[in-house]
Amino acid sequence: MAPSFSDADSMFNFVVRDGNGVKGLADLGLSKVPQKYVQPREERIDKLNATLNNNSPIDLSKLDGPDHDQVVEEIATAAETLGFFQVVNHGVPVELLEALKIAAHSFFGQLAEEKSAYRKGVSLARWCSMEQVLRQRKRRHWSGRTISACVILMIVKPAKFGLKNAEQLFNTCISREVALEFLRISIKMVRKLVEILMGKLGVTLDDAKIDALIGLKMVNMNFYPICPNPELTVGVGRHSDLGTLTVLLQDGIGGLYVKVEENMEGKKQEAEWMEIPPIPGALVINIGDTLQIVSNGRYKSAEHRVRTTSVQSRVSIPVFAIPKGTEKIGPLPQVVESDGVALYREVVFEDYMNNFFGNAHGGKKSLDFARIY
Ligand SMILES: O=C(O)CCC(=O)C(=O)O
């Protein structure tokens, strides 16, 4: 029998505590999204009013040839303007990308009881790291996430995280080796991109400093179930990512939108939302808050959000490259010297992260924590 959600807590318990996720709600065959998921008008995604980003993906293999400088320019320009770009010939085999998408679908396709088997011994907070944020949100998002920080830790050190059943997860959905390979190649690419972006700021960072910026890696699997009213809700509300760079694998459904507030000359314009369309074999790269802070605002962390559809579920798999908690992040001295002013103060990354996850920020408000006024 379909559960009745008589009070605010009963739906939360069904979705989060009992592990049904938003998919559990979708599987009930609701004809309308519950009121808790209906977003205020200004947060809804009007796809007819959005533009389409038709920039060609950047071909990273050309970094090794005569077009090297032009490719570097394309990467830096994208990071300075939209904060988003797509890359091809990034080194991750297309079959591996396909295997990951299938794995995400098969993970979320399992029954709640099956999924909860992986959760044994893991605190709910860790299993669903968004719990705190979910509770604070007045309106919820039509999507499900795995285990945020845990997936990577599960891949690398399952036992340490009490994930006794991690092997089972990987055997059911994807081989651990495949997941590790995706992570390994993605991080190699992130390192290269960070070197390039730093180089364009006139800064050469040694390996230790680059490690400081991308020392922690988090992999999520996001699932956006079919939604009866995509026009009323959001898959993920507008936010920026907190780390240095994010590598995102999206499937072919579409629905990822980035906010554009400046024109190509860097002049403020009326904000509009631009869809980042799926390109077969491409990975999406976006700039996170840390890189905006470190570059003293030269590179723009990208405000983005996701729309669901009423016809197909969608998966995405982001790899977040973030600093270690103990790292201090602030504008690089060389950049401040050439800019003449620091726009951000130095903060301990863990404090930044606690503020980021401890509050439901609208858009890029998370950056205010480090901003100098
Ligand atoms: O699903 C997507 O395309 C984006 C996901 C995202 O923004 C996130 O996981 O923070």
Image (tube, rainbow, N blue to C red):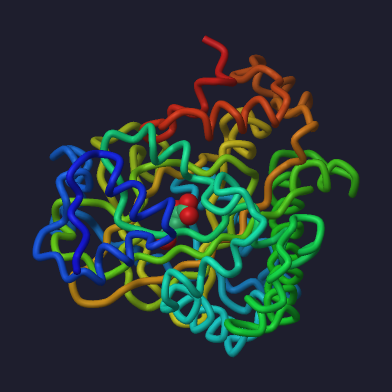
Q: Residue furthest left?
A: 31
Front residue of this view, candidates 282 and 147:
147
Is residue 161 left or right of 92 when viewed as pictured?
right
Picture coordinates of residue 279 (x, y %)?
Answer: 42, 77
Residue at horizontal 48 percent and vertical 45 percent from the top: 130
Picture coordinates of residue 286 (x, y %)?
Answer: 53, 53
Front residue of this view, candidates 367 and 267:
367
Is residue 139 shown above or below 245? above
Q: Residue furthest front?
A: 1
Picture coordinates of residue 236 (x, y %)?
Answer: 36, 51
Corner quadrant of residue 319:
bottom right
Front residue of this view, candidates 297 and 250:
250
Is residue 83 shown above or below 54? above
Quadrant observed for ligand 1 in the rendered image: bottom left
Indicate the quadrant containing the N terminus: top left, top right, bottom left or bottom right. bottom left
Residue at horizontal 41 percent and vertical 32 percent from the top: 360
Residue at horizontal 81 percent and vertical 46 percent from the top: 210
Residue at horizontal 55 percent and vertical 20 percent from the top: 369
Please tell me how many numbered marks the rendered image carries: 0
Is residue 259 left or right of 170 when viewed as pictured?
left
Is residue 103 shown above or below 276? below
Picture coordinates of residue 347 (x, y %)?
Answer: 69, 22
Is residue 323 left or right of 113 when viewed as pictured?
right
Q: Residue furthest top?
A: 373
